[in-house]
Amino acid sequence: MKIVLLGPPGAGKGTQAKSICNRYNIPHISTGDIFRKHMAENTPLGIEARKHIDIGHLVPDKVTIDMLLERLKNEDCKDGYLLDGFPRTVLQAEALQQFLESNNERLTTALLIEVPREFIIERMTGRRVCPSCGASYHTKFNPPQIQDKCDICGSDIMQRKDDTEETVRERLDVYESQTQPLIDFYENKNLLSKVDGTKAINAVFESICEILGDEK
Ligand code: AP5
Ligand code: MG
Ligand code: ZN
């Protein structure tokens, strides 16, 4: 199964990705998580990415595409994967398409998690993330069992630097101008499926499982 997850910042891509990847036993590939790991380690890629991420802009296509295609060559991607946060521009979508075609492969689906703008600010400002394992929490909608500690690995959870209200508004504008065109891109290829992302986390996951079915 090869899945692309689409949706605005705060739609719940990361949250649903964890559950989907557990259930279907495929790797969760989040370009945002990969960039954040590089940023934490201050690699050259991390230093470049930080300049864009901290102000809510996209990392340039070339850097992002090279990084992602390299990741897809890993052994663990043989039987499928879930892409969270990639593609985000038409150029990225075309690069992925070319890569798939050159390997005689195709996407199973591009799954759009729809959440209107007015929900997003509250979701983002209440979000807390685990810097060690990437788990995502929310102070109100999805609090950890022990305050400020990750349920999965016990690390201290924290707020992302790009989750301030001002940067979130910028990220939403970037989403609308650069990423929304991908909805048509995948619709034209008959690959788009949509779920209502305003429901509770479990209810959204149930809708996703109905779409994906039992196929592994
Ligand atoms: P990235 O990390 O991908 O950020 P994003 O797309 O803006 O998405 P988020 O991670 O903010 O939201 P999410 O949909 O994963 O929501 P979550 O599940 O956490 O990218 C960061 C940056 O990296 C970009 O801005 C860009 O600069 C760069 N980048 C990454 N990929 C790139 C690319 N391909 N090209 C160029 N640049 C790239 O949920 C949010 C909150 O809501 C959480 O607190 C969660 O607990 C809560 N929540 C989730 N679901 C629900 C629900 N159903 N009800 C109530 N609360 C919920
Ligand atoms: Mg995410
Ligand atoms: Zn953790």
Image (cartoon, helix red, strand yellow):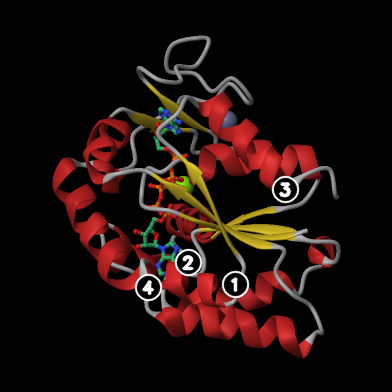
Label 1 CB-ligand 1 distance < 8 A? yes
User: Mark 4 or mark 3, which is nearer the start of the sequence?
Assistant: 4
Q: Give the secondary structure at mark 1.
A: helix
- Specify the label residue 43 is tagged with: 2
Tell which tag, 4 or 2, sits nearer the viewer: 4
Q: Amino acid at mark 2?
A: Thr
Q: Is residue 127 visible?
A: yes
Q: Give the secondary structure at mark 3.
A: helix
Q: Position of residue 63 (x, y in %)?
A: 47, 80
Tell which tag, 4 or 1, sits nearer the viewer: 4
Q: Position of residue 80 (x, y in %)?
A: 79, 61
Within the image, what quadrant is residue 183 found in?
A: bottom left
Q: Amino acid at mark 1?
A: Leu
Determine crowd level at label 3: few under 14, some 14-19, many 20+ residues with C-alpha closer than 10 A: some
- Specify the label residue 129 is tagged with: none
Above or below residue 85? Residue 147 is above
Above or below residue 181? Residue 95 is below
Residue receiving disc 4:
181
Whether the residues at callouts 4 and 1 have beta carbons within 8 Å, the answer is no
User: Mark 3 or mark 1, which is nearer the start of the sequence?
Assistant: 1
